[in-house]
Image: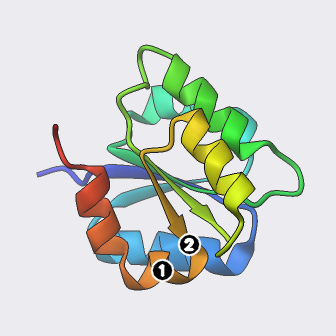
Amino acid sequence: MTQPTALVVYEKLLPGTQLVNRLQDLNYRVRAVTDSNTLLACAQQEKPMLVVADLESTRNDICNAIAQLKKEPSTQHIPVIAIAKEGDASLMRAAQAAGATLIASETAILSHLSQFLDQALQVE
C-alpha cells in the first residue's frame, strides 16, 4: 500500500518540522512547502491527500495560496488544515474565507493531530 501524501506549508522551523515529524509518524509521506507561491503547482504534481498550512508568514500570503488551491478544479477537493495563533480571529476568518477546511490553533495541532486529520478527511 502506498503512503498518503501531505503537503505542509510553513516558515517557522520549530513547529513546522515537528508537524512534519508527527505526520511521518502517522505514516504520511510529507512534502514541505516553504514558499506558498509554489503550493498550487506542488499540489498539482504531488496529488496530496491533504494540506496543512501555518498561516503566519513574513514573506507570503498563505490565505491567498489556499484560495488559489481551492479555485483550481484539479485541487479544490484537497482538504486544508490551517494553523493560526490562538486568538488571531482576523487570520482565522481570512483562512475560512479562503476555503480552509479546518482551522486549528498552534497549541492544539500537535497534540490533537490525528483527530484533526480524521475530521478534515471525513467524506461528506
Q: In this view, does 23 lie to the left or right of 94?
A: left
Q: In this view, does 19 lie to the left or right of 59?
A: left
Depth check: give the residue in front, 29 or 118: 118
Where on the picture, by quarter, is residue 62?
A: top right
Indicate which disc residue 108 carries: 1
Depth check: give the residue in front, 33 or 79: 79
Q: Is mark 1 in CB contact (under 8 Å) with mark 2? A: yes
Indicate which disc residue 105 carries: 2
Work out how far the residue at label 1 is from the one at label 2, CA to CA, in angstroms: 5 Å
Q: In this view, does 121 lie to the left or right of 72?
A: left
Q: How crowded is mark 2: few (under 14 residues within 10 Å), some or many (20 or more)?
A: some
Describe the element under mark 1 as helix, strand or loop.
Answer: helix
Q: Which residue is drawn at 49% across and 33% down?
A: 43
Q: Which residue is drawn at 75% across and 61% down?
A: 56
Depth check: give the residue in front, 76 or 9: 76
Where on the picture, by quarter, is residue 97?
A: top right
Which amino acid type corresponds to the residue marked 1 in the rendered image? Ala
Is residue 15 visible in this depiction of the protein? Answer: yes
